[in-house]
Amino acid sequence: MKQTFKRTLQVALTTFVATATMGVFATSAYAGDNTWITDKSGRCITITGGGNLIDTQCSWGNQGQLWDRVGSQIKHAYSNQCLDSNWNGDVYWGECNGGNFQNWDYFDEDGGWVRIQDRETKLWLHWCLRDSTNYVYKPCTVSIHFYGEFWSFYGGE
């Protein structure tokens, strides 16, 4: 009897500690890896001021890098801002409006990688050099499929 009580107490204590630990260290639904990265550089699309986007080193917890795929839209996880584009090949973030410039088609390239095409322009999501002095890149869209980057998305749908 004494041995059974001891074993029951050990199991209960282990279950309590495991449950409490999960609660403390669990991340929120938005704090997951909802981040687009490229296979080429492993860099993330990151929000900056004024609707601008740049590529920066991916860093855990950087809210400017967290995106959700909602249907065909790529939506910032902490706002009602979507990845948007225009006929000039510019890619930026703006208020989600459901327009085709904010809708993207995904083409599987195996291994969890996709190519991403703007639904309106049919241009491919890519990195373009923004500042040649400091080698800062920003997302853009290009017309040639071969030059489109492979992207990987973690989380979301």
Image (spheres, rainbow, N blue to C red):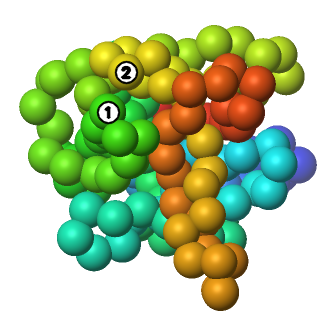
Residue at 52% x, 60% y: name it.
138
Q: Going 67% across and 32% down the picture, which residue do you hit?
A: 148
Determine contact: label 2, label 1, CB under 8 Å: yes
Q: Is residue 102 above or below residue 61?
A: above
Marks 2/1: CA–CA distance: 6 Å
* Front residue of 154 and 3: 154
User: Which quadrant of the figure has residue 134?
Assistant: bottom right
Residue in the image at 77% along x and 56% along y = 42
Compare residues 44 and 11 and report the one nearer the observer: 44
Say which of 123 and 6 sits in front.
123
Q: Which residue is mark 1?
A: 87
Q: Position of residue 124 (x, y in %)?
A: 55, 28
Q: Does residue 64 sit above or below 132 in this rendering? A: above
Mark 2 or mark 1: name the one nearer the start of the chain. Answer: 1
Q: Nearer the viewer, residue 68 or 20?
A: 68
Residue situated furthest bottom in the rendering? 133
Q: Residues within 10 Å of mark 2 (few under 14, many from 20)?
A: some
Query: In which quadrant will I find the N terminus?
Result: top right
Q: Position of residue 9 (x, y in %)?
A: 71, 54
Give the percent coordinates (x, y) of residue 49.
27, 75
Please rate how many residues cluster around mark 1, counting C-alpha atoms within 10 Å: few if below 14, some from 14 to 19, many from 20. few
Q: Which type of secondary structure does the marked residue at label 1 adopt?
A: loop
Which residue type does callout 1 highlight? Trp
Compared with 7, 156 (above or below) is above
Residue on which disc 2 sits: 121
| Residue 61 seen from this side | no
Instruction: Measuring from the top left, give residue 93's x and y in whole percent.
Output: 28, 51
**SS at badge 2:** loop
- Amino acid at dot 2: Thr
Visible residue check, residue 127: yes
